Image (tube, grey):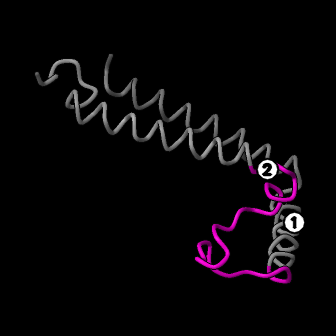
Amino acid sequence: MQRWKQYGGLGALFAAFLAAGYWGFTATGGALPWAKRSAKALQRGVQEGGGALVNLGRGIIVAGPIRKGGLMVEFGGLVALLAVVGLGLYVYVDRYGGFDEDQATQ
């Protein structure tokens, strides 16, 4: 495939998604509704408190909807799953030398 066709296709795809994003932005009222919601959430967060994410006296701070919604077990499971996947990828890359099939070490 010729380079100009590749760049032209990529440019057309970018323009189409840019136009769709602009249409969605204007159809939903633009940034004003989101700015109002964001300001309310920030003000509510400032009023309820704040502080460090990790405090040895209090433990790890978890977002209010997770904590208040009774989702701590699910959240812990998700954190554990991501930790296991990360450790597994680390061991795999260390043992086999990467993801490339051509350069596998013995």
Alpha-carbon distance for marks 1 and 2?
Answer: 16 Å
Label annotation for residue 25: 2
**Left of 105 or right of it: where is 11?**
right
Quarter holding residue 32:
bottom right
| Badge 1 density bin: few <14, some 14–19, many ≥20, Cα 10 Å | few
The residue wearing badge 1 is 37
Q: Given the image, on which type of amino acid does mark 2 rest?
A: Phe
Residue 49: x, y in percent? 79, 82
Residue 80: x, y in percent? 57, 43
Foreground of the two, 96 or 59: 59
| Badge 2 density bin: few <14, some 14–19, many ≥20, Cα 10 Å | few
Residue drawn at x 39%, y 26% is 6
Foreground of the two, 27 or 39: 39
Residue drawn at x 59%, y 38% is 15
Residue 106: x, y in percent? 10, 21
Residue drawn at x 47%, y 31% is 10
Residue 85: x, y in percent? 47, 36
Foreground of the two, 26 or 52: 52
